[in-house]
Structure formats: C-alpha cells, structure tokens
Image (cartoon, rainbow, N blue to C red):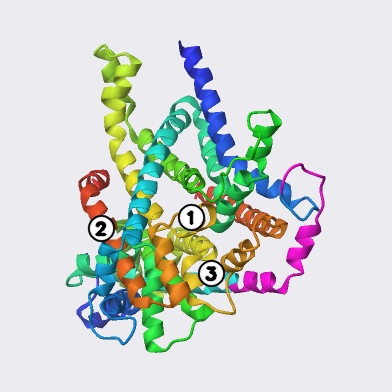
Amino acid sequence: MSVSGSNSRALPWALVTPALAWTLLFFVLPFIAMGLSSLTAHEGGGFTLANYSQFFTDPSYWRAMVNSLEVTATVTVISILLAYPFAWILAEQVPERWQRLALMLAVLPFWTSYVVRSYSWLLVLAQNGVVNRALSGIGLIAEPLQLANTRFATVTGFVHFFVMLLTLTIFANLKQLSPSYRKAAADLGAGPVRTFLHVVLPLTLPGIMVGAFLTFVLCIGDYITPQILGGNNELVMPQLVMMQIGRRGDFPLASALSIILMAVVTIAYLACARWLKIERA
Amino acid sequence: MRAIVRIAAWLYAIAIYGFIFLPVVMLVLFSLQATSFPIPPFTGPSLRWYQAVLSDPRLTSALVNSLLVAVLSSLASVTLGFLSAWGFARFVLPGSALLRGLITLPLTVSYLIIGMGLLVLFNWAGVPKSLIAAGVGHVVINLPLCFAIIYSQMGDHQINIERAARDLGAAEWKVLLMITVPVMAPAIFAGFFLSMTFSWDEFVISFLLTRFDTTLPVEIWNLLRSGLNPKTNAVGSLVFAVSIVLVVFFELTLLRRKPA
C-alpha cells in the first residue's frame, strides 16, 4: 500500500507521532502513575500492598464489588429480555420505510444529558412522584412506596439506557440476516416458532453478546446512575472509588480500587472474546 | 394467530416506547410549572424556571465553558485522529497493528478510570485542576473514536485519486489539503460530531479535573444536591432541545449528501 517516495520516510512518522504521543502521555503514563500510586501508603508514602489487601479483607469493600456485579448482571439480563422482542418488532413488524423513524424515536430521549436523564427518573420515582401519585390515586397503596434511593431505582435507570443500546445492536443483527435462511427453514418444514428458536436466535447470538458486553462494561464503570438513583444506602465500586477521593483525598486507595475494577472488566472481556471475534468476522 | 401476534407486538412496542419516554416527558412537563417542586399535579404552563436558568450566571458560564471545551477538544481529536489514520492507511510502518491498537486502547477503559489516572498524574506533576485539564481528558476519550472512524473509511479508491494528484506534481501537503481532506469530509465530520456530543455530555472526567470554572454537566450535578428542583428540569429540557436541533440538522445534512 506504500505510495511514498523514498525521500519522505519522515512524513509517515510525523503523521502518526502526535496521536501516539498523546496516548502515551495522557493515557499510558496516567495509568502507570495510578499503578505506582496504588502501591504507595496514603500516610508516609512508602511501598505497601495495604491498599489491595484492604479490599480483600474489609467486607464492606467486598460488598461494593458484589453489589456492582449483582446490579450489572440484573441490568444486563433484564435489558436483553426487554430489548430483544422490541428489536424484533422493529425489524419484522414495522414496515421498512417507517423503521428509520421508529428507531430515531426510540433513541430520541437519550439526546438529553446523561446526568439529566438519571435525574428524570428521580422525578418519576420520588415519594411524591408520578408513580406514587398514580398508585395511591387508584387506591393500590395507602403510603407512598420508597422507590428512589434504592437498588430498584438504579436498575430502572440503567435498564432504560441499555434497552436503547441493545435494541440498536440486536436490530442491526436482525437486519443483516439473509431472508434465505428463514425461507430454507420454512421449506424444510419448520414453523415460525421452530425457525425462530433454531435459526434466527442462534444467528443473532453474536449481536446479543456484543450488546451484553457493552452493557456490562458501561454499567459496572458508571458512577452517575447509582449515585443519583441509588443514593448512598448501598454502594457500588465507582461510588467507593469516588468516595476515597472526595472525602479523604486517598488517591492510593482510589487507584487500587480502580485497578481492581479494571481487572474485573478485563476478565469479562476475555470471557466474551470468542463471541466478540465472531461478530467482527 | 397472525392477528394475535400483531396486536401483541403493537402493545409491546407501545409499552416500551412508554417506558422510554416516561422520564423525559416528566422532565419537560414539570419544567413548565411555576411551583417550587416539579411534582404532580400539573398546575399550568409557566416559563418562570427557564428565566431563572437563563439569568443564572453560573449556569450560563458553564454552558459557554462546555461549548468551548467540546469544540476545542473535538478539533484536537479529529486533527490528531485524521493525521494518524492517514499515516497508518497510506504508509507501511513497522509495528503498525500494535501502534493502531495502542491508539484505540482508551476505548476499552471506563471514563472514571481515565479521569482517575489523569487526576493522579496531574496531582503528582503539580498541574492545577482546570478546564484545559478536562479538555485533555476529552481528547483522550475522543481521539481513538475519530481515528477508528476515519481509518475505517480510508479505502483504496481514495488512494488512486491521491496518486493521480501526486503524478500531476502536487506536493504532499497539497494532496492532503486539496484531495484527502475533501474526500474524507463525511468521516471527518462524523468524527467531529460524535466527539462534540461525547464531550458535551461527559461528566466524570470534568468532575474530577475541574474546580471553579466547570462544564454544564458538573454544574447540573451541583444543582442536584438540592433534590428535586424545577431549575434542573428547565436546564435539562434546554439541553434536550439543543441536542434535538443538532440531531435533526445532522440527519438532514447527511440525507442531503446521500445522492452525491
């Protein structure tokens, strides 16, 4: 692919060096700084593994990781279950020329800011919010339910966002399926249900896995939704990280917790790598 | 049977659209109410809280800051991304795959960890918190995106046009400015637009790396401390309106480009 003359050996490096330098200076170097910081004592500054051992021995820190994993798993499963039929309806039941509009409409609410979108759920779920007003209005409840500042609120806010994301990935996958697969299944005598279970569903599995992986990564690393909707009753990992910086300025512990969080995401990536590769092929 | 499936599909789609739109409708509806709590029952339209937002210097200056950071960091991201994409697509470089992997690596790391890393580094190097620090962080998250978009669009047929220009005696910088940039304009525009939206909406990095002068998402976050607040509704609705105008504009310009 080389089209350069031999006189311009310096040009390609001049083109790529700024981007590489930026990445090294402001991504790799910070990461090394974080790694070094995580091995430093907050008081005094000597070498220590205490920041890591604190995570593994203090049950409240463990609890945050367990909460993170539980919330993320719940969100991923519920989002897939809600998004798959929706994507299927958009791809199969909505006439072709309305599909673009239907998708745009589904994505529209996400063009407000992420922080504001989480706050909007607070309006819905608050003590005197719409849900409680409606439920007491029709006489189902006497006292307002505690919906905000709970795990339920965190999961709702997350599911709202990830249903949109998964709808997009699954919709794209369904549209890529060649209709001849379905015709072949029908010709061989399979009914619509069997065709779906044995042909369509397995072929859209890569799309589901990519969406699930994205959901996992974005969900487990997010601070905004749990902080606004879950409150401080039950912490997840990003809240724990932010707390170390905000309250005590404990950068070493915050660094160690960040690195542990990143290790968990890496493990998830390796577990999904097989599926993510299939999608790319 | 088919009719039942159709009706069930319609009902399901309506339920999901309802779920998706519920919070946003509440946001906008109760931004238009004069009472000091954005809660039902709705008591009639008023622009009181929009006035309060537009006359709040903290919010308006945060808005200007956000726009500045978004435009400048996106320009930097798209420039660095374009130059490196061009370099990697047109020339054979040793270790090319590894270096391309390095540039796209930040895409796999959460914003919180990128922000934390920069905070630790800047703290250690004595760099004070500022909008510039936040802008640097935004380039870190958007450069890989611009690179990936532009690199994936650099096909062989553009090489031929560039080769023709070179054969006709154009200098390398002339090829770049007069051939490659115009040909790649859609990808460059897409990279810039996406960077703008991500920077405009980015919270955690700005939260960690700015102090007094800050961006709109961080200022909105500060408003949230007071709980349910109609001012937050009004700001949120304004951000929403601006985004929709941008999206519609983007759709129209892209659609218009299609026949070409």
**Residue type, label 2:** Thr
User: Residue A196: horizontal and vertical position, in percent?
Assistant: 32, 23
Of residues B162 and A186, the one drawn nearer to the viewer in this rendering: A186
Q: Is residue B250 visible?
A: no
Which quadrant holds the N terminus of chain B? top left
For label 3, the SS is helix
**Residue type, label 1:** Asn
For label 1, the SS is loop
Chain assignment, label 3: B
Badge number at residue A252: none
Q: Is residue A105 left or right of residue A60?
A: right
Chain assignment, label 2: A
Does A150 appear above or below A176? Answer: below
Badge number at residue A233: 1
Q: Residues in magenta?
A: B39-65
Q: Which residue is painted at 56% across and 44% down in the image?
A: A147
Neighbour tally class for label 3: few under 14, some 14-19, many 20 plus, Cα within 10 Å: many
**Residue type, label 3:** Ala
Q: Which residue is painted at 44% across and 31% down in the image?
A: A91
Q: Is residue B128 left or right of residue B230?
A: left
In the displayed image of the protein, which residue is found farthest to the left? B94
